[in-house]
Amino acid sequence: MRPENNNVSSFPNRRDFAVQVGFERKEMEHILNLYGRMVAAGHWRDYAMDMGKDAAIFAAFRRASERPQMRIEKRPADRNKQGMWTLHGEHGQMLKRGHDLTGVLAPMERRLMKLVSE
């Protein structure tokens, strides 16, 4: 006589797993383009990314042992409020918030501008 196996395991639903917030390809291209130019200018040397259930965060560091000089957060839950993009400064202050990543990164882009005299 063969033993019967009556243990049935159901396939987990997609709803059972926590959805992870991440950056889309175009967003990462824009962020890493800025990061590369800031590295070339000598402002940044390292970066870190955190992708969690509520937010995706990109942080840029002057030195790896310090706190981040800049932090970009993407929080889709805030999309209908003041925008899902937030730019935080070195001390945690909110520098800019909005619906468009380009507009939120504008203060960092201004750091790259240099006055050229004739």
Image (cartoon, rainbow, N blue to C red):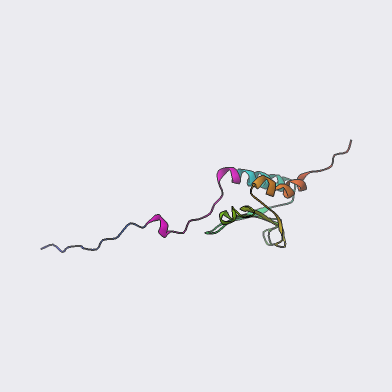
Q: Residue at x 66, y 43 (%)?
A: 33
Residue 59 is drawn in which quadrant?
Answer: bottom right
Q: Is residue 60 visible?
A: no
- Classify 28 as above or below 21: above
42 vs 49, nearest the viewer = 49
In which quadrant of the rendered image does the C terminus lie? top right
- Residue 73 in the image: state x and y as whole percent: 62, 55
- Residue 13 in the image: state x and y as whole percent: 37, 56
- State the extent of the magenta-drawn residues as a range: 13-27
Assign the magenta stretch its main secondary structure: loop
- Classify 75 as above or below 40: below
107 vs 81, nearest the viewer = 81
Q: Is residue 6 left or right of residue 104?
A: left
Residue 29 is drawn in which quadrant?
Answer: top right
Q: Is residue 99 visible?
A: yes
Q: Residue at x 72, y 45 (%)?
A: 40
Q: Residue at x 68, y 59 (%)?
A: 68
- Residue 2 in the image: state x and y as whole percent: 13, 62
Residue 34 lies in the magenta-colored region: no
In which quadrant of the rendered image does the N terminus lie? bottom left
Residue 21 lies in the magenta-colored region: yes
Q: Is residue 40 left or right of residue 13?
A: right
79 vs 8, nearest the viewer = 79
- Residue 26 in the image: state x and y as whole percent: 59, 42
Q: Residue at x 85, y 39 (%)?
A: 116
